[in-house]
């Protein structure tokens, strides 16, 4: 779903939400902490806050501050989905990036700040997802960067062996039926521009993913591969669930 113009209620929520950033406490800690020593290992806490749960809670708080308090639970859920698609959605979510391994996710190596935005294509405005990385400790170069279908960065079995990050599933694809004679089409929306790591081992250059919104990446994961090869090992991962 793509909203060309938002419903009237959106303006009420947007006015209350202007300048708001949303992220779980774990991401705030990752942002403040210095780069970990090479031997350090950080495992996720059992009850690490969910970015999606925090996002929903903040959205409910915004609704409560407007004249939409009497809405049904179903309508609130619909409004939340609409808000995730809106290009001018002021929410920004920060996701923790962790290294993957056969034994599970481990060391924190940075964050991804994700929000909706707009780009101009041939003079017209189009929806896009803006991803600002703050990742450290990698070798300089380009890394394949994708949205994967599952919000799980753990290992999974393949040919009897545990493969790091495999629980994230395949790359995100969009499929549908065209209007010309039932033509089937598919688009590899999850294939993002490469992540660029500078000489100091950090990645801070923003990545813009055309046609994607927060609604498309909820309950998905962002995967950094071990090289520019799309099929290389799954090096690090950040779920949005």
Image (cartoon, rainbow, N blue to C red):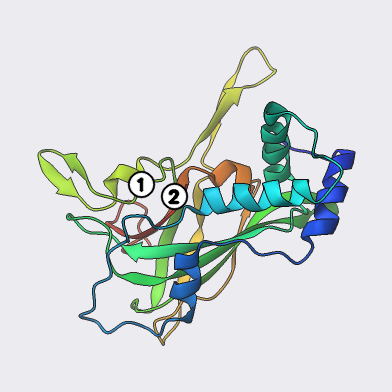
Residue 122 in view:
no
Identify the residue at horizontal 81%, vertical 54% (top origin): 14
Return the x and y of residue 9 as percentages of the image width and height: 86, 41
Residue closest to the eye, 67 or 37 = 67
Mark yes or no: residue 155 visible.
Answer: yes
Instruction: Return the residue found at the far left.
Output: 160
Q: Which residue is mark 2?
A: 221
Which numbered tag is attached to residue 152?
Answer: 1
Q: Is residue 29 above or below residue 189?
A: below
Q: Earlier in the sequence, mark 1 or mark 2?
A: 1
- Quarter of the image for residue 90 reads bottom right
Say which element carries label 2. Answer: strand
In the image, what residue occupies the spot 74% across and 53% down?
89
Distance, label 1 to label 2, CA atoms, is 7 Å
Query: Residue 19 sits in which quadrant?
Result: bottom right
Determine whether, in the image, residue 43 is placed left or right of residue 158.
right
Question: How would you rate the neighbour count of disc 1 (Cα within 10 Å): few for under 14, some for 14-19, many for 20 or more?
Answer: many
Q: 43 or 143, which lies in front?
A: 43
Secondary element under disc 1, as helix, strand or loop, is loop
Q: Is residue 110 above or below residue 56?
A: below
Which numbered dot is residue 68? none
The relative height of residue 140 versus residue 230 in the rendered view (above or below) is below
């Amino acid at each position: 779903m793509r909203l060309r113009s938002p419903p009237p209620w959106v303006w009420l929520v947007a006015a209350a939400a202007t300048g708001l950033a949303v992220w779980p406490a774990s991401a705030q800690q990752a942002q403040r902490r210095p780069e970990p020593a090479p031997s350090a290992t950080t495992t996720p806490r059992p009850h690490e806050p969910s970015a999606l749960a925090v996002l929903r809670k903040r959205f409910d708080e915004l609704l409560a501050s407007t004249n939409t308090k009497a809405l049904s639970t179903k309508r609130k859920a619909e409004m939340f989905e609409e808000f995730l698609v809106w290009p001018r959605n002021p929410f920004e979510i920060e996701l923790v990036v962790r290294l993957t391994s056969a034994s599970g996710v481990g060391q924190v190596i940075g964050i991804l700040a994700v929000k909706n935005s707009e780009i101009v294509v041939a003079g017209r405005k189009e929806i896009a997802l803006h991803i600002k990385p703050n990742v450290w400790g990698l070798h300089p170069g380009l890394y394949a960067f994708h949205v994967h279908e599952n919000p799980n960065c753990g290992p999974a079995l393949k040919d009897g062996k545990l493969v790091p990050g495999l629980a994230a599933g395949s790359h995100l694809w969009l499929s549908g039926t065209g209007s010309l004679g039932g033509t089937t089409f598919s688009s590899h929306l999850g294939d993002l521009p490469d992540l660029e790591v500078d000489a100091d081992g950090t990645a801070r250059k923003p990545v813009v993913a055309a046609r994607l919104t927060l609604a498309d990446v909820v309950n998905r994961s962002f995967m950094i591969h071990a090289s520019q090869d799309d099929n290389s090992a799954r090096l690090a991962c950040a779920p949005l669930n």
